[in-house]
Image (cartoon, rainbow, N blue to C red):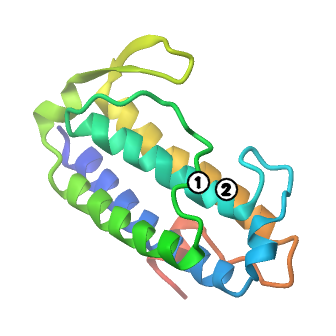
């Protein structure tokens, strides 16, 4: 493993935590009704999408830890209450950072076999799956950010360099 790849994943884990903090702080300014309003996104609402990100993180981290878990229930609402979702998000973000801090060369050079939500048995390079893991979070945070722009609450700046190095 090159220090660059290892360090990059650690940076993405830190960015993930900080970006989630900004996004949840913005969403806190919305009513529950506004967070649950169907905004025609992949997972319907801000609340649905925030739950989906957590579902995805748990699926991938379980696989990375050697567990088997299918990609089912991608639209599940794990936490009905926003405050409970935020507590769970913070806990998961700490788990993501511990995961990134514990990466090894052998792990990133390996592959992971899993079953996706189309029930296909797949095996992919671990380094690509870890990259996907972080990309998935960013993709759906972008959707939430776009949904927040439809409200009275300003959408937070989520650019990686502005989150990591605020002006």
Q: Please give left or right for residue 131 compared with residue 142 in the image.
A: left
Quadrant position of the N terminus in the picture = top left
Separation (CA) of disc 2 from disc 1 = 6 Å
Vertical relation: 69 (above or below) 97: above
Query: At x 59% / y 83%, what residue is drawn?
Result: 25
On screen, 63 above or below 154? above
The quadrant of the image that shows the C terminus is: bottom right
Residue 114 spot, x, y in % from top left: 36, 21
Above/below status of 108 relative to 8: above
Seen at 62% across and 43% down, the residue is 75
Q: Are marks 2 and 1 in contact (CB under 8 Å)?
A: yes
Label 1 element class = loop
Q: Earlier in the sequence, mark 2 or mark 1?
A: 2
Outermost residue to the top = 121
Q: Nearer the viewer, mark 2 or mark 1?
A: 1
Left or right, 126 with respect to 21, comes to: left
Pointer 2 residue:
48
Q: Residue furthest front?
A: 80
Q: Position of residue 110 (x, y in %)?
A: 20, 24
- Pointer 2: residues within 10 angstroms few (<14), some, or many (20+)? many
Residue 25, placed above or below residue 65 = below
Q: Which residue is mark 1?
A: 77
Residue 119 in percent (x, y) is at: 50, 15
Q: Position of residue 116 (x, y in %)?
A: 48, 22
Q: Which label number is shown at residue 157?
A: none
Residue occupying image coordinates x 76% and y 82%: 31
Q: What kind of element bears circle 2?
A: helix
Question: Residue drawn 48% across and 54% down?
Answer: 54
């Amino acid at each position: 493993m090159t220090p660059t790849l290892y360090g990059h994943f650690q940076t993405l884990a830190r960015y993930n935590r900080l970006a989630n903090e900004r996004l949840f702080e913005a969403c806190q300014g919305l009513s529950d009704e506004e967070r649950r309003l169907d905004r025609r996104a992949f997972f319907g609402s801000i609340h649905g999408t925030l739950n989906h990100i957590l579902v995805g993180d748990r699926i991938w981290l379980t696989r990375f830890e050697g567990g088997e878990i299918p990609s089912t229930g991608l639209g599940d609402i794990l936490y009905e209450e926003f405050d409970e979702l935020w507590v769970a998000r913070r806990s998961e973000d700490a788990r993501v950072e511990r995961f990134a801090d514990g990466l090894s060369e052998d792990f990133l050079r390996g592959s992971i076999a899993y079953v996706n939500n189309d029930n296909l048995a797949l095996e992919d390079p671990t380094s690509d799956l870890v990259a996907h893991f972080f990309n998935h979070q960013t993709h759906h945070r972008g959707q939430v950010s776009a949904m927040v722009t439809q409200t009275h609450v300003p959408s937070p700046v989520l650019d990686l360099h502005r989150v990591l190095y605020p002006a």
